[in-house]
Amino acid sequence: MLRGMRPQILFPLFAGVETLKGVGPRVLPLVQKLAGPLVRDLLFLAPSGVVVRRPMTAADAVEGLTGQFEVLVDRLIVPHKPGAPIKVRASDETGFVHLIWFGGSAQHIERLVPKGQKRIVSGKVERFNNEVQIIHPDVFRPEEAGDIAAVEAVYPATQGLSSRQVRKLVQAALPHAPELPEWQDPAWLAKRRWPGWRAALGQLHAPAGEPDLEPDAPARQRLAWDELFAHQLALARRRRARQITPAPVILPGEASERLLAALPFALTGAQTQAIAEIRRDLASGEQMGRLLQGDVGSGKTAVAALALADAAASGFQAALMAPTEILARQHFQRLAPMLEAAGVTTVLLTGRDTPAERRPRLAALASGEARVAIGTHALFQDTVRFDRLGLAVIDEQHRFGVNERQRLQAKGDPRTGGVHLLTMSATPIPRTLELTQYGELDVSRLTEKPPGRTPVTTAVLPLTRIGEVAKRLKAALDGGAQAYWICPLVAESEASDLAAAEARAADLRRILGVEVGLAHGQMPGPEREAVMADFADGRTPLLVATTVVEVGVDVPNASIMVIEHADRFGLAQLHQLRGRVGRGSAASTCLLLYGGGDEGLGETARVRLETLRRTENGFEIAEEDFRLRGGGDPLGLRQSGFPAYRFADPIRHRDLLLAAADDARLVLARDPDLASPRGEAVKVLEALFDWRNDRPGVD
């Protein structure tokens, strides 16, 4: 929604926070950093907790609760030792109340609680030597007693801006929130018994207790649904825009048939279905946007290869982009011979090509002689010209930004229409998060593995048995096997992680008497890729790697994966690491080593490791990971490219997300121009959340 088209009713919400009383030049940058630049952003800053103050005396104070005391200040105790707390002794008729400050100036505290004056103090009650103490209390003058809230929302704070100051600013912003037309379906609203939007916002900022802040509180549910609905509308609009964009008509041909015949295996049922779905899209004349999701080893590359051949058979070009050079070269080495045998000329483009290597490849693409380009980010550089690009395939799409994807698609010829897009992901995710992140894409799932893939035997062992593991590993390596050894995040510092990995590599080199490669994120790219290449080519039998390195190379001979401190890894990450073995004909093993003994293994970690031991199904594992993580930061969404929701939690609000997605599709199908009374209200909602303009990090 362009700013000039924003409904006038929303103007007060989209005013700058500097228009609020109390937001001066000093406070403005702090508010902008904490919440955002708009009045709306401040109102969308949900409380993080609630304080319930209970009147108490020193005699009846209950430890652990937030008490409110009327006291007389006795004396200030300033420490002589640097860093020691400043203490103030106060009392009421029943005993002493000690007030403690860590940091701050004695002069400021003396002005706050002057000796001989009465004050009302509030804070969490603790006991030390059986006397009441409060650390960093709230302090009020007696004449302010009427302003003390028995229940007070607690807000996120930042250096220089306290929670109480934020609360005052939110209260100042609330009158700027107008009554808005109702965009929810009346029957749905009645069924859920939710308040209106304005009332829900007011309730959010006036909680009566902790339950009012829970995700299933009516006001929070109402606001979460609105946010999810606005996001799903944006995704549905993108889907509609794609569907009405003309694109080349791509059909299977002789090259496709030759490639299919050259495949060294029969396609699984899931692969056959995915290919049928992709071909239906390519033949539609509308721009394809499809996500191909499947486990490591489920056969995504074969499906993509047939799509590349289809493009070539129809007289168009196709590009396959991978996030790292080693993965791009691996794709090229695997696909180029089959495509060449099918009559399709293929070139490789990476950032490390010499000018002499690059010139003929660029010329072949520009002339149309080369029908398929496989490469890295080098594919969308300005010097790359395609003759008739019709299909872009992106491997491990989460590793690329939206702009990078669009730059590759922009290489198409406007005369032939938009470029079809096929993205691939080897990280299975639950249906709910799939809908959240990829709602504008159609999804094909590969739920089977091709014949010949050997199952991986997974064992869970304590680290105390590492000597036994090393002995078994030596026997396997002496027999010609190759193995990965993954070192965990053992400290906050990457340098410490590296030191631990280097020490482990040295230990294994000494104990096993074999060449041990070491790959980590602090190595220069070419050096790291050389180590990985030595392992892939069989020159190095054992590779020790930290978790920050991409270990996605295909090494069929690697049949053993050892993961140290597996209890510190996420379930999905463990599954991805395990997927690096079992890619050849040899029986494969994954050993999950946990620290601390059985008594040191938490229940969640125990369930996580048992799930890995029990199943290799990535989609089942993803659902279990989703369930185990529960609330908190859902799957680390902000670090994974997922929307930065203000009110919604895709895990706790799963049912609302599904309902919002259905409603968004239904609304746009019935009223694509949003011209009905409800449609006009929905336009206000879209502008309120403004997903398309105000969230630069959201695809």
Image (cartoon, helix red, strand yellow):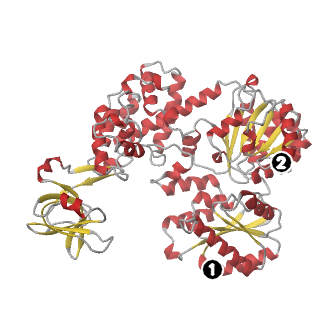
The residue beneath circle 2 is 354
Q: CA distance from mark 2 to mark 1?
A: 49 Å
The tag earlier along the polypeptide, 2 or 1, is: 2
Name the element at disc 2: loop
Relative placement, left or right, of 113 versus 5 is left
Which quarter shows the C terminus? top right
Nearer to me, 102 or 497:
102
The amino acid type found where label 1 is placed reads Arg
The residue beneath circle 1 is 465
Picture residue at 32% right of the left edge, 40% below the top: 24
Relative placement, left or right, of 146 versus 547 is left
The amino acid type found where label 2 is placed reads Thr
Mark 2, residues whose alpha carbon is within 10 Å: few (<14), some, or many (≥20)?
few
Mark 1, residues whose alpha carbon is within 10 Å: few (<14), some, or many (≥20)?
few
User: In the picture shown, does residue 356 fall above or below 365?
Assistant: below
User: In the picture shown, does residue 468 fall above or below 116?
Assistant: below
User: In the picture shown, does residue 53 fall above or below 64?
Assistant: above
User: Could you say where residue 413 lies in the image, as x and y percent from the top left?
Assistant: 76, 27
Q: Toward which corner of the image does residue 476 lie, by quadrant? A: bottom right
As drawn, the residue found furthest toward the left would be 93
